C-alpha cells in the first residue's frame, strides 16, 4: 500500500467488518435488538447498499417504533429517493420521539410536506 488513501480505506474496511461482527453477535443473542438493526442499516448505507440499509432500518423501527435515530435515517433515505410522503412520515415520527433531525433536513431543503 503505497498511498495514504489506501491505508485509510483499509482501516475503515477493517472497522466496518469489526462493527458488523459485533452487531451480528448481539443479534445472535437478542434477535429483536432494534439498535443493532439500526447500526447494520447505517453500515449498509455507508457501503452504498441503500436498499439493504432501508430494509434493516425499517425492521429496526418495526421492532422499536420509538427509535428516533432510525426514523431520521429513514427520512434521509426516502428524501434521496424522492418519496417525500414517506420522508415526512419518518421525520414526524422521529420528531415525536425526540429527534428533530429529519424535520430540520426537510425544512432546510424546502421539501413539501403535502
Image (cartoon, rainbow, N blue to C red):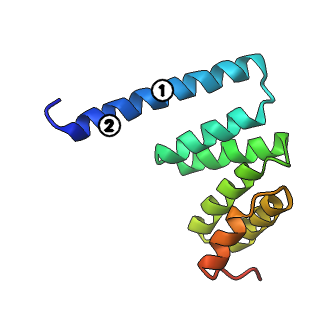
Residue 111, located in which quarter of the rendered image? bottom right
Q: Is residue 51 left or right of residue 70?
A: left
- Determine crowd level at label 2: few under 14, some 14-19, many 20+ residues with C-alpha closer than 10 A: few
Q: Residue 79 in the image: state x and y as whole percent.
A: 62, 68
Q: Nearer the viewer, residue 100 or 49?
A: 100
Q: Residue 110 in the image: state x and y as whole percent.
A: 63, 82
User: Could you tell me which quadrant the C terminus lies in?
Assistant: bottom right
Q: Could you give the CA–CA distance between mark 2 and mark 1, rounded to whole angstroms?
A: 12 Å
Mark 1 lies on residue: 17
Q: Residue 73 in the image: state x and y as whole percent.
A: 65, 54
Mark 2 lies on residue: 9
Q: Is residue 84 above or below residue 24?
A: below
**Residue at screen point 70% across, 82% down:** 112
Residue 83 seen anywhere in this rendered image of the structure: no
Extreme residue in the left direction: 2
**Residue at screen point 75% across, 42% down:** 59
Q: Residue 57 in the image: state x and y as whole percent.
A: 69, 46
Q: Secondary structure at mark 1?
A: helix
**Residue at screen point 80% across, 63% down:** 95
Q: Is residue 11 left or right of residue 29?
A: left
Residue 37 seen anywhere in this rendered image of the structure: yes
Count all numbered tags in the image, as a single digit.
2
Q: Is residue 68 above or below residue 102?
A: above
Residue 33, located in which quarter of the rendered image? top right
**Residue at screen point 50% across, 24% down:** 18
Q: Which mark is residue 53?
A: none
Amino acid at each position: 500500500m503505497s498511498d495514504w488513501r489506501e491505508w485509510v480505506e483499509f482501516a475503515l474496511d477493517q472497522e466496518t467488518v469489526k462493527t458488523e461482527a459485533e452487531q451480528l453477535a448481539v443479534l445472535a443473542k437478542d434477535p429483536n435488538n432494534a439498535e443493532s438493526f439500526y447500526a447494520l442499516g447505517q453500515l449498509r448505507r455507508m457501503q452504498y447498499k441503500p436498499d439493504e440499509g432501508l430494509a434493516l432500518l425499517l425492521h429496526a423501527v418495526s421492532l422499536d417504533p420509538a427509535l428516533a435515530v432510525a426514523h431520521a435515517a429513514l427520512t434521509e433515505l426516502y428524501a434521496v429517493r424522492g418519496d417525500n410522503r414517506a420522508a415526512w412520515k419518518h421525520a414526524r415520527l422521529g420528531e415525536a420521539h425526540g429527534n428533530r433531525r429529519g424535520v430540520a433536513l426537510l425544512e432546510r431543503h424546502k421539501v413539501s410536506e403535502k
